[in-house]
Image (tube, rainbow, N blue to C red):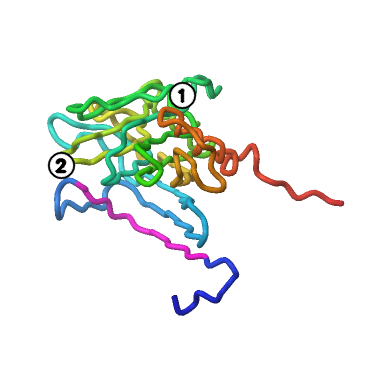
């Protein structure tokens, strides 16, 4: 608050540069024989989105098998303590985005649900009323979608995990392949992509948002997604 008089944008860049990989389900399980990561997180005041630029290089060949039962390979995931009621994703087949965006509900006792061929946006939201609404989306750039399909080779999916080994999770996830599949990842595999974590008002009610029903709340994230896709990026040309 001591700098509240400043009118110019304030930007913070957080950089992760490491070869260490940790296991989120097991304290102290940290290794350096998987991959090296450079990730840049950009935080800009006055916005509802956080861009993350990511480079990952696999330095060792590994078999994705966390234990006897589970494997899986995730591109990105977002978790939160808010209990979302609706989930949706844009389906992509052969890199052509279709309109399979019908919202669905996660079953009360469900652990994991998956949907095939995710496109550039996945989202979950809650919209009981204007005062209790919450929406979160991951918007993935076109290069990230291509990587997802090339490496996944038909097993790529959108997933939501309601409960994990540590309790309630409530996540939205881009997966190269689901947790039930185990597979090799080879040295030299390189990932170069960016995504945006977007917070939105699914029911509207404020300037900048469309007033929508609960079932259509995802549209308040979708209408802003072209801001983050390469196809719509501005170009500089001579006068």
In the picture as drawn, the residue positioned furthest to the right comes out as 239
In the picture as drawn, the residue positioned furthest to the left comes out as 68
The answer to whether residue 135 is magenta is no
Left or right for 134, reference 71: right
Say whether residue 126 is visible: no
Q: Nearer the viewer, residue 35 or 91?
A: 91
Quarter of the figure with residue 103: top left
What residue would you read off at disc 1?
101
Q: Residue at x 43, y 40 (%)?
A: 137
Say whether residue 213 is visible: yes
What residue would you read off at disc 2?
167
The answer to whether residue 16 is magenta is yes
183 lies above or below 42: above
Which dot marks residue 3?
none
Q: Residue at x 44, y 48 (%)?
A: 55
**Residues in magenta, as a range:** 11-24
- Residue 134 position within the rendered picture, expressed as x and y whole percent measured from the top left: 38, 43
Labels 2 and 1: the sequence-earlier one: 1
Q: Nearer the viewer, residue 197 or 102?
A: 102
Q: Residue at x 45, y 56 (%)?
A: 41
In the picture as drawn, the residue positioned furthest to the bottom comes out as 2
76 lies above or below 21: above
- Residue 192 position within the rendered picture, expressed as x and y whole percent measured from the top left: 48, 44
Q: CA distance from mark 2 to mark 1?
A: 28 Å
45 lies above or below 76: below
185 lies above or below 14: above
| Label 1: which secondary element | loop
Please identify the dominant SS of the magenta region: strand
- Residue 169 position within the rendered picture, expressed as x and y whole percent measured from the top left: 23, 41
């Amino acid at each position: 608050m001591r700098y509240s008089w400043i009118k110019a944008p304030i930007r913070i860049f957080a950089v992760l540069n490491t070869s260490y990989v940790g296991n989120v389900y097991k304290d102290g399980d940290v290794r350096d024989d998987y991959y090296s990561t450079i990730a840049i997180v950009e935080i800009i005041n006055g916005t509802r989105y956080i861009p993350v630029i990511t480079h990952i290089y696999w330095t060792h060949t590994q078999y994705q098998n966390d234990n006897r039962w589970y494997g899986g390979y995730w591109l990105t995931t977002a978790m939160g303590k808010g209990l979302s009621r609706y989930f949706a994703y844009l389906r992509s087949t052969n890199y052509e985005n279709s309109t399979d965006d019908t919202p669905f509900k996660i079953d009360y006792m469900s652990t994991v649900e998956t949907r095939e061929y995710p496109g550039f946006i996945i989202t979950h939201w809650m919209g009981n009323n204007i005062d209790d609404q919450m929406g979160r989306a991951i918007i993935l750039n076109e290069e990230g979608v291509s990587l997802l399909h090339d490496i996944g080779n038909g097993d790529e999916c959108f997933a939501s995990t309601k409960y994990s080994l540590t309790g309630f999770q409530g996540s939205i996830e881009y997966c190269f392949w689901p947790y039930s599949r185990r597979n090799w990842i080879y040295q030299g595999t390189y990932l170069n992509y960016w995504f945006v974590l977007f917070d939105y008002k699914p029911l509207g009610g404020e300037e900048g948002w469309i007033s929508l029903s609960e079932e259509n709340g995802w549209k308040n994230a979708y209408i802003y997604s072209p801001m983050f896709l390469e196809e719509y990026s501005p170009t500089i040309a001579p006068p």
